[in-house]
């Protein structure tokens, strides 16, 4: 992001800080380092925050792609000891890229029913653009040449970015985690959350466990009960408590999130939910 207008710039940062469309800067200039490389950049920022808080653990909020970078730092980059509380909203994402790319022959097999509305994936969709650019060699300023996602073809780099299956750590006993999803969020975020909280059986028979933590609080604005439907006629039964063995709360529906979209905190009630969950467990 660029510096705000009329901001003093004594260090000359404006000369090298590029301006990108909102939400796209994180995957620029990764030089083929992919989502794991982006997560490592975030890990460096969290290290800085930890060190400058006199080594006190951090309470962090991460939204959408930021949630993917943070879950990557936790599950792949050993960042667990940096955090006290984490509130994910619109995520965590980056669970399993093949399904986002409409690939059915990978480690987790065919896509579940809730992934079939992604058939509208195009070269310009946010998911395709971010995956393509994050995997493109060079600075990807003008074009992103990686096209395995667009073509629906599997490769090892795509699995490397699937933090749910490539995780080396899924258990965070010292961290309180909250997950917030707005009822009007029509992004693929909730599909990723279903994997992170529900676990899955791989095609080779291996059981991939869900994340666990000191506490995991889930709040969603889609469905009040297990009956009925949400979004594109997906069953509310997807949110049945028996699907989430590691969550701590029994009441996962929050009416305050009913009108929140993917940018949860743009909605006042959504912002209040995120703030409340943060303050409940963050040890100031």
Image (spheres, rainbow, N blue to C red):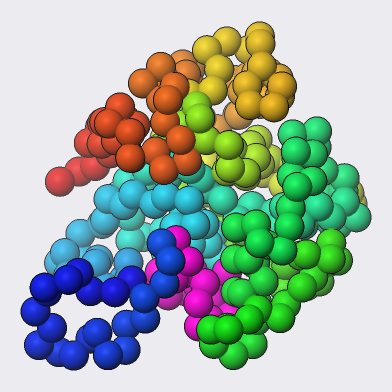
Report the predominant secondary structure element of the magenta stretch.
helix
Residue 162 quadrant:
bottom right
Residue name at image x 24 percent, y 42 percent: 282
Residue 118 shown left or right of residue 202 in the figure: left
Above or below: residue 61 compared with residue 274:
below
Q: Which of 281 and 265 is in front in this view?
A: 265
Nearest the camera: 75 or 105? 105
User: In x, y percent, where is residue 142?
Assistant: 58, 84
Res 194 seen here: yes
What is the number of callouts on the image?
A: 0
Q: Is residue 183 left or right of residue 19?
A: right
Residue 25 lies in the magenta-colored region: yes
Q: Quadrant of residue 151?
A: bottom right
Residue at the (41%, 72%) spot, across then down: 20
> Is residue 227 part of the magenta span, yes or no?
no
Q: Give the range drawn in magenta.
A: 23-44
Residue 179 visible? The answer is no
């Amino acid at each position: 992001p660029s510096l705000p207008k009329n901001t003093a710039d004594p260090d000359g940062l404006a000369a090298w800080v590029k301006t990108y469309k909102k939400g796209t800067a994180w995957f620029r200039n990764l030089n083929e380092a992919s989502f794991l490389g982006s997560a490592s950049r975030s890990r460096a920022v969290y290290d800085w925050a930890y060190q400058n808080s006199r080594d006190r653990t951090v309470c962090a909020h991460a939204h959408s792609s930021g949630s993917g970078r943070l879950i990557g730092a936790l599950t792949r980059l050993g960042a667990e000891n940096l955090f006290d509380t984490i509130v994910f909203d619109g995520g965590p994402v980056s669970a399993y890229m093949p399904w986002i790319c409409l690939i059915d022959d990978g480690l987790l097999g065919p896509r579940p029913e809730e992934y079939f509305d992604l058939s509208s994936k195009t070269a310009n969709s946010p998911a395709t653009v971010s995956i393509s650019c994050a995997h493109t060699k060079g600075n990807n300023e003008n074009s992103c040449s990686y096209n395995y996602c667009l073509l629906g073809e599997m490769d090892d780099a795509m699995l490397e970015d699937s933090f749910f299956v490539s995780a080396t750590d899924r258990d965070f006993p010292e961290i309180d985690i909250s997950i917030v999803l707005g009822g009007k969020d029509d992004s693929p975020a909730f599909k990723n959350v279903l994997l992170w909280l529900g676990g899955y059986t791989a095609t080779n028979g291996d059981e991939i466990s869900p994340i666990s933590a000191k506490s995991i609080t889930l709040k969603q604005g889609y469905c009040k009960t297990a009956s009925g439907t949400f979004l594109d006629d997906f069953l509310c039964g997807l949110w049945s408590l028996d699907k989430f063995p590691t969550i701590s709360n029994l009441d996962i529906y929050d009416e305050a999130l009913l009108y929140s979209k993917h940018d949860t905190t743009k909605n006042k009630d959504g912002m209040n939910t995120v703030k409340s969950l943060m303050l409940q467990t963050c040890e100031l």
